[in-house]
Amino acid sequence: MSLIGLLINRLNILISLICIELMFYGINISLIIFSSILDDQFGSAATLFIVTVAASESAIALALLVRFFRGFSDIFLEDF
């Protein structure tokens, strides 16, 4: 669903960022389920890494979003 939301939404960059975050969390759920089925701890370690990357990506993207909004006074994707 998040890929569909990313492809359909061409107006708001904030919704696109939320769709990317949903993709990261979907991957995390898959890794946790497969690591519990296979009795392996790699999925849990990879999940911690992905959560860290997603949090840093979210912070940087929101900082850029604030900077674009201050400079251009709108955040529509069609303008870029």
Image (cartoon, grey):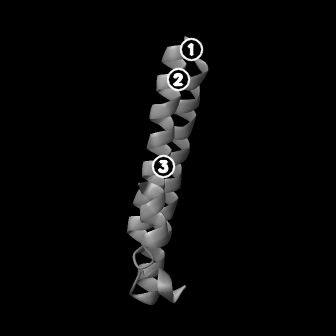
Q: Secondary structure at mark 2?
A: helix
Identify the residue at horizontal 55%, vertical 11% (top origin).
39
Q: CA distance from mark 1 to mark 2?
A: 6 Å
Quarter of the figure with the N terminus? bottom left
Q: CA distance from mark 3 to mark 2?
A: 17 Å
Image label count: 3
* Residue type at the position of mark 3: Met
> Badge 3 is on which residue?
23
* Residue type at the position of mark 1: Leu
Instruction: Report crowding for label 3: few under 14, some 14 to 19, many 20 or more residues within 10 A (C-alpha).
Output: some
Is 70 rendered above or below residue 35? below
Across and down, in percent, residue 67 comes to: 47, 76
Is 24 rendered above or below residue 41? below
Identify the residue at horizontal 49%, vertical 45% (top origin).
24
**Residue 5 shown left or right of residue 52 in the figure:** left
Q: Which mark is residue 38?
A: 1
Across and down, in percent, residue 17 comes to: 45, 62
* Residue type at the position of mark 2: Phe
Q: Earlier in the sequence, mark 3 or mark 2?
A: 3
Q: Is residue 53 visible?
A: yes
Q: CA distance from mark 3 to mark 1?
A: 22 Å
Is 50 rendered above or below residue 69? above
Across and down, in percent, residue 37 comes to: 51, 15
Q: Secondary structure at mark 3?
A: helix
> Badge 2 is on which residue?
34
Identify the residue at horizontal 49%, vertical 35% (top origin).
28
The one of 59 and 80 positioned closer to us in this rendering? 80
The reply to whether the C-beta atoms of the residues labelled 1 and 2 are less than 8 Å apart is yes
Q: Secondary structure at mark 1?
A: helix
Instruction: Report crowding for label 2: few under 14, some 14 to 19, many 20 or more residues within 10 A (C-alpha).
Output: some
The image quarter containing residue 10 is bottom left
